[in-house]
């Protein structure tokens, strides 16, 4: 019997600079095993001696043998990760949590709304849709960052922008030179773009305040809760519903989430 | 179920010695002025408290600090350094816990829901459970803060015990509850008897609570002044959570010494301000009132949703240990009745009028104005 809290060694294969303070770390487990992660699931990444933090899996490659986590420099674990180099061994456990029910969304139009690092857990959803393009309808992606320098996944944004099957809208909080996208906070841009519910699925992730106001904007546009999904951020440590800290009422975000359909969470939560 | 057997009080030391020869024996003993569960030590006098051991049983199965992995660095030059995590092995030698009261045993049963009856079992915890035979002890009295009878338990409840014993006159009566329990009651010192423990009618109604009425209580909402009243008293020291036999929240922490170190789980408290604070500074429960509310609702509402059971066993340790006189059982009973959290028999403000609610009939008011003892 394995103690779930003990992580497995993973080699750091590549580091991608995503923005001024976000890097993506690309791992492969040392024993060659796959990370059987579904879109929306997360892992716990360890720097032994420093600590462990929770990150969404932001991309799977090579038949799940390679996986990305995209990390914003914030606390001591993320700072230590940002100092690490290709070739180092880092420790990982997971995947954990309930994924996005992408199979249930077949045949429907999808709206992705990501704010800042909140795009990380949503990118596997986009990857899944693009890999199974005929299973899904129209794909809208709305991505917002504070400044152009905070835009992550630039290569993807460029590719998505050129993809005729995707309608991409990028926005920054405050106007600035050499910016050709929208300007404005995400909830306002959601209203400006007048995204209609029409049987569509909305998937929203970003800072808590962005999620709250984006939900309100969607509600204003007539979106029923049953068509809106989010993935919530909460302080987590064990990732398996035992350490206690990530509860929202009687649900653990790590175990019962992090993906929730809006009607599955109490209104005062977000 | 097997019948009762009698042990003469004079034979107790010999019986304990027999048990200790079969397995590691853990019994309540006094250390630093408090009774607690410790491996039998002949230097300490044995006394089985008639009710409630001061420090709960949970640390026997879930220690306050518990290494789960070790890491070290290999290789001489820094570039060859490797860090390895290895699971800590758990001991499998048999152990007997004797003298745990119904509240503590029931609490361990609840904790099983978190660590054993879970999608991810905790093998360290499970090994500690499996290697242990519990000879529980029926209480012969209820102490002032005891209210297990209001929590679907009683001082003679055998739930979760492998065997049970009770003080009876000049001896103790023992009975096996499970096969595991029967295996440790084979001693020749235990004599067949027709004696049975006296049936008693235990008082109830001191701090009655119904999860449904808590959910329906207008005070349960976040904005209700109830929570601020509680928070104004609270120090958020976490003592109630550490004393509670069913509180098992923990943090995962790396302790490093010269490159090598251990990853440990350590008891944590949902009452601490940093408990749910994220590295970006966002804290979903940044106010004291939000944290005391989360804990009180967790015990009676959230755990029902999570594990199908409330998680208060009525031991009263939270009230006993609180340095500022917060009285969780009274507060939760008041919440359940739509009263002010400070309602009590002592200050006589147990009226709904204080909160703008109509008075209850004397029947409903039951345990709040009078303790069951004086009725």
Image: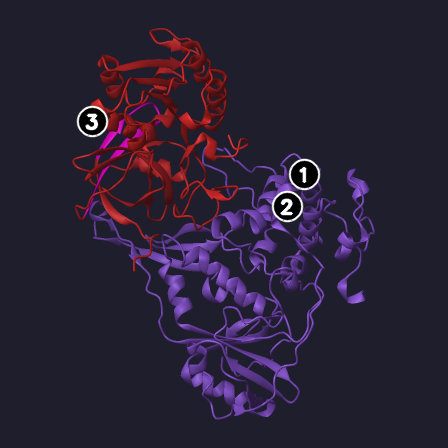
Chain colours: A red, B purple
Locate the N terminus of chain A by quadrant: bottom left
Q: Name the outermost residue toward the right.
A: B348
Mark 1, residue position: B218
Front residue of B87/B292: it is B292
Image coordinates of residue A204 in percent, x first then y, are: 40, 25
| Secondary element at tag 2 | helix
- Residue plotted at (53% across, 41% down): A249
Labelled disc at residue B214: 2
Structural distance between the alpha carbons of marks 2 and 1? 8 Å
Image coordinates of residue B229 in percent, x first then y, are: 71, 42
The answer to whether residue A173 of the structure is visible from this angle is no
- Mark 3 belongs to chain: A
Query: In the drawing, does residue B252 fall left or right of residue A63?
Result: right
Q: Are marks 1 and 3 on the same chain?
A: no
Q: With respect to residue B207, does B24 lie above or below?
A: below
Labelled disc at residue A131: 3
- Residue plotted at (48% across, 45% down): A245
Q: With respect to residue B275, does B201 lie above or below?
A: below
Q: Which residues are magenta?
A: A14-30
- Residue plotted at (43% across, 72% down): B132
- Mark 2 belongs to chain: B
Q: Is residue A16 magenta?
A: yes
Q: What secondary structure characterizes most of the magenta part?
A: strand
Q: With respect to residue B187, does B30 lie above or below?
A: above
Image coordinates of residue A85 in percent, x first then y, are: 24, 37
Q: Is residue B78 magenta?
A: no
């Amino acid at each position: 019997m394995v103690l779930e809290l003990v992580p497995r060694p993973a080699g750091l294969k590549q580091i991608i600079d995503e923005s001024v303070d976000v890097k993506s770390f690309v791992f492969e487990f040392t024993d060659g095993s796959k990370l059987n992660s579904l879109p929306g699931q997360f892992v716990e990444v360890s720097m032994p001696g420093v600590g462990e933090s929770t990150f969404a899996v932001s991309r799977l490659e090579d038949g799940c043998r390679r996986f990305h986590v995209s990390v914003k420099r914030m606390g001591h674990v993320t700072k230590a990760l940002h100092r690490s180099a290709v070739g180092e061994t880092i420790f990982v456990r997971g995947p954990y949590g309930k994924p996005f029910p992408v199979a249930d969304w077949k045949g429907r139009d999808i709206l992705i709304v990501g704010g800042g690092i909140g795009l990380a857990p949503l990118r596997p959803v986009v990857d899944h849709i693009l890999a199974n393009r005929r299973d899904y309808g129209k794909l809208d992606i709305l991505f917002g960052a504070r400044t152009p320098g905070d835009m992550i996944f630039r290569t993807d944004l460029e590719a998505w922008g050129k993809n005729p099957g995707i309608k991409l809208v990028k926005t920054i909080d405050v106007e600035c030179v050499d910016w050709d996208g929208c300007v404005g906070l995400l909830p306002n841009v959601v209203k400006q773009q007048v995204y209609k519910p029409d049987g569509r699925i909305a998937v929203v992730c970003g800072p808590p305040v962005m999620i709250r106001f984006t939900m309100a904007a969607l509600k204003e546009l007539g979106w029923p809760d049953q068509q809106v999904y989010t993935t919530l951020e909460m302080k987590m440590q064990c990732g398996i519903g035992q350490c206690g800290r990530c509860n929202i009422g009687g649900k653990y975000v790590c175990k019962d989430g992090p993906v929730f359909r809006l009607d599955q969470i109490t209104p005062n939560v977000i | 179920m097997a019948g009762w057997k009698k042990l003469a009080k004079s034979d107790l030391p010999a019986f304990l010695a027999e048990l200790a020869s079969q397995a590691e024996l853990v019994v309540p003993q006094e250390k630093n002025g408090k009774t607690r569960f410790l491996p039998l030590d002949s230097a300490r006098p044995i006394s089985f408290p008639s009710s409630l051991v001061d420090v709960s049983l949970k640390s026997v199965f879930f220690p306050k600090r518990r290494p789960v992995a070790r890491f070290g660095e290999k290789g001489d030059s820094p570039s060859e350094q490797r860090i390895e995590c290895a699971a800590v092995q758990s001991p499998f030698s048999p152990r007997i816990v004797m003298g745990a009261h119904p509240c503590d045993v029931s609490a361990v049963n609840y904790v099983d829901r978190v660590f054993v009856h879970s999608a991810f079992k905790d093998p360290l915890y499970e090994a500690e459970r499996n290697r242990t035979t519990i000879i529980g002890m029926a209480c012969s009295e209820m102490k002032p803060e005891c209210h297990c009878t209001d929590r679907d338990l009683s001082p003679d409840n055998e739930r979760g015990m492998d065997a049970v014993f009770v003080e009876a006159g000049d001896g103790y009566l023992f009975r096996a509850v499970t096969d595991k329990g029967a295996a440790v009651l084979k001693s020749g010192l235990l004599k067949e008897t027709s004696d049975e423990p006296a049936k008693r009618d235990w008082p109830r109604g001191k701090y009655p609570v119904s999860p449904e009425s808590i959910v329906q209580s207008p005070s349960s909402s976040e904005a209700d002044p109830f929570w601020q009243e509680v928070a104004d008293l609270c120090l958020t020291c976490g003592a109630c959570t550490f004393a509670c036999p069913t509180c098992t929240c923990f943090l995962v922490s790396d302790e490093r010494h010269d490159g090598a170190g251990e990853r440990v789980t350590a008891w944590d408290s949902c009452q601490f301000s940093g408990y749910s604070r994220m590295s970006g500074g966002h804290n979903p429960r940044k106010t004291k009132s939000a944290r005391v509310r989360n804990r009180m609702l967790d015990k009676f509402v959230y755990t029902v949703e999570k594990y199908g059971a409330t998680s208060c066993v009525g031991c009263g340790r939270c009230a006993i240990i609180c340095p500022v006189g917060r009285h969780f059982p009274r507060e939760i009973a008041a919440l359940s009745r739509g009263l002010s959290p400070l309602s009590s028999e002592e200050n006589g403000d147990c009226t709904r009028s204080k909160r703008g609610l109509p008075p209850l009939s004397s029947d409903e008011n039951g345990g709040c104005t009078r303790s069951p003892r004086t009725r």
